[in-house]
Image (tube, rainbow, N blue to C red):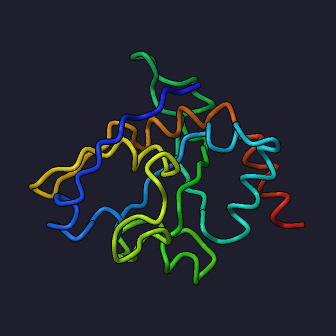
């Protein structure tokens, strides 16, 4: 189990830039949110079915410990969830990036989710007054964390289709 992230919120910093990250890149979630549910597949399927969450695709298994992935995994698609944007929820599909639309959980006063309920990437975000906030838990981290759970993702998608 991954250790909880210490609350590093800086509302004044976020207000100053208008929460730009919440308008351009909702944070990716770690598997633990869904694995801790009594029915992990059902939990992910419900999140996807309601439209508040989408699946992103990472092409290629990332290098780990300085080692490249096996040749057969270099172009393997790894899927992982993150909150949808308002536009994605309306369209019913995840966008490829570059679109400007707020996270479905963003409200005028900030995130509707308590810090402990936010996606791992959002919790790990290091606010910066310069507006160039970064998260050490990124797409590469998500791809590696979700790699062993691709069967769970596929079963959740299958439940959404039925």
- The residue lying at 72 percent from left, 53 percent from top is 44
Q: Quadrant of the C terminus?
A: bottom right
Q: Which quarter of the picture shows residue 100? A: bottom left
Residue 9 as seen in the image, left or right of residue 79:
left
- The residue lying at 81 percent from left, 64 percent from top is 160
Residue 90 image position (x, y, % from top left) = 58, 83
- The residue lying at 81 percent from left, 52 percent from top is 42
Q: Which quarter of the picture shows residue 55? A: bottom right
Give the answer, above or below, for where 47 lies relative to 7.
below
Q: Nearer the viewer, residue 4 or 133?
A: 4
Residue 3 image position (x, y, % from top left) = 49, 26
- The residue lying at 75 percent from left, 61 percent from top is 46
Residue 5 as seen in the image, left or right of residue 91:
left
Residue 139 image position (x, y, % from top left) = 43, 44
| Residue sticking out furthest to the left | 130
| Residue sticking out furthest to the right | 162
Q: Nearer the viewer, residue 20 or 73?
A: 20
| Residue sticking out furthest to the bottom | 90
Give the answer, above or below, for where 153 lies relative to 11.
above
Give the answer, above or below, for where 133 lies relative to 4.
below
Residue 47 image position (x, y, % from top left) = 68, 61
Q: How many marks?
A: 0
Q: Nearer the viewer, residue 68 or 162?
A: 162
Q: Quadrant of the N terminus?
A: top right
Residue 124 as seen in the image, left or right of residue 4:
left
């Amino acid at each position: 189990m991954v250790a909880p992230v210490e609350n590093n919120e800086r509302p004044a910093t976020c207000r100053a830039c208008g929460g730009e990250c919440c308008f351009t890149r909702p944070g990716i979630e770690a598997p633990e949110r869904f694995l801790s549910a009594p029915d992990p597949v059902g939990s992910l399927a419900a999140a996807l079915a309601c439209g508040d969450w989408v699946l992103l695709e990472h092409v290629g298994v990332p290098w780990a410990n300085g080692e490249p992935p096996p040749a057969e995994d270099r172009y393997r698609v790894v899927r992982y969830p993150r909150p949808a944007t308002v536009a994605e929820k309306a369209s019913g599909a995840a966008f490829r990036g570059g679109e400007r639309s707020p996270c479905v959980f963003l409200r005028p006063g900030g995130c509707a989710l308590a810090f402990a309920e936010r996606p791992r990437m959002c919790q790990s975000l290091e606010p910066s007054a310069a507006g160039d906030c970064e998260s050490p838990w990124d797409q590469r981290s998500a791809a590696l964390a979700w790699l062993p759970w691709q069967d769970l993702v596929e079963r959740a998608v299958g439940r959404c289709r039925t």
